[in-house]
Amino acid sequence: MRKLVYYIATTLDGFIAGPDGADPTGPDGFWPLPADYIRHIADHYPETLPAPARAALSVTAEGTRFDTVLEGRRSYEIGLKAGIADAFPHLRHLVFSRTLTESPAPAVELVATDPAGTVRELKRQEGKDIWLLGGAELAGSLYREIDRLILKVGSLTLGTGIPLFSRTAAFDPRAWKLTEHTVLDSGAAFLTYDRPADPDPGT
């Protein structure tokens, strides 16, 4: 079965953006983008690069991990404000919103129904894994559906900001198993955690 993978950049203190929610990698952003960090993503997660970055880096690889990307309205609107209506034309692109009534790009699918129900249906379909891009509100609503975390941990702290999961996420402590890790010379770490299988209720 396909997995829902929360692949996201986070600071050491667990924030994915500043308090204003703006793109931390944008022109006024604070996120470090050293060459080895960009190269690692291009080599191992090429499908997660937005189309302009793929073009700039001459990345044409299809990628082997994801064929679908999910994001919430606020995350999607960051790209819209930059003039990018579909940052991932090489993936099936779903945006969860109850306020957007018309998609700004023909290939971007708007979903106004329950995110968890939608993800469960997607998991039953054939294909590669499903990439949960964010933001925190959507991640919070899908907390119980996430099968894998891939954290791009930057070597910085913010003090405050937008957390990995919104404060509305259910209190549901979970243990995760570290299954892969890469630490770059620049200080960033790529950490993969899998959720252990739920125990068989019959045992």
Image (tube, rainbow, N blue to C red):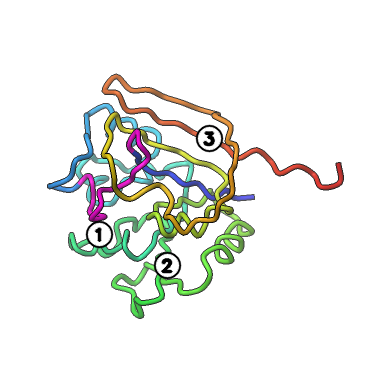
Residue at position x 22%, y 29% in the image: 35
Per the image, label 1 sits on a secondary structure element best described as helix
Question: Where 203 falls versus 37 (above or below)?
Answer: below
Q: Earlier in the sequence, mark 1 or mark 2?
A: 1
| Residue tagged 2 | 96
Query: Hey, which residue is sitting farthest right in the picture?
Result: 202
Residue at coordinates 80% horizontally, 44% vertically from top-left?
200
Left or right: 93, with 202 as reference point: left
Q: Mark 3 highlights which residue?
A: 193
- Residue depicted at x 35% and y 66%: 73
Residue identified by numbered label 1: 79
CA neighbours of label 1 inside 10 A, class few (<14), some (14 to 19), many (20+): some
The structure residue drawn at horizontal position 46% and vertical position 54%, both measured from the top left corner, is 139
Local crowd size for mark 3, using a 10 Å CA cut-off: few (<14), some (14–19), many (≥20)? some
Measure the alpha-carbon separation of dots 1 and 3: 28 Å
The earlier-in-sequence mark between 1 and 3 is: 1
Residue that protrudes farthest toward the left in the picture: 28
Does dot 3 land on a helix, a strand or a loop?
Answer: strand
**80 or 13: nearer the eye?**
13
The amino acid type, in three-letter code, at marker 1 is Gly
Q: Is residue 150 magenta?
A: no
Label 2 is placed on what type of residue?
Phe
Q: Quadrant of the C terminus?
A: top right
Residue 105: which numbered mark, if any? none
In contact (CB < 8 Å): disc 1 and disc 3 = no
- In the rendered image, residue 27, in percent from the top left (x then y), is placed at 13, 47
Label 2 CA crowd tier, 10 Å (few <14, some 14–19, many 20+): many
Q: Which residues are magenta?
A: 11-25
* Residue 192 x, y percent position in the rendering: 49, 33
Residue 135 location in percent, x, y? 37, 55
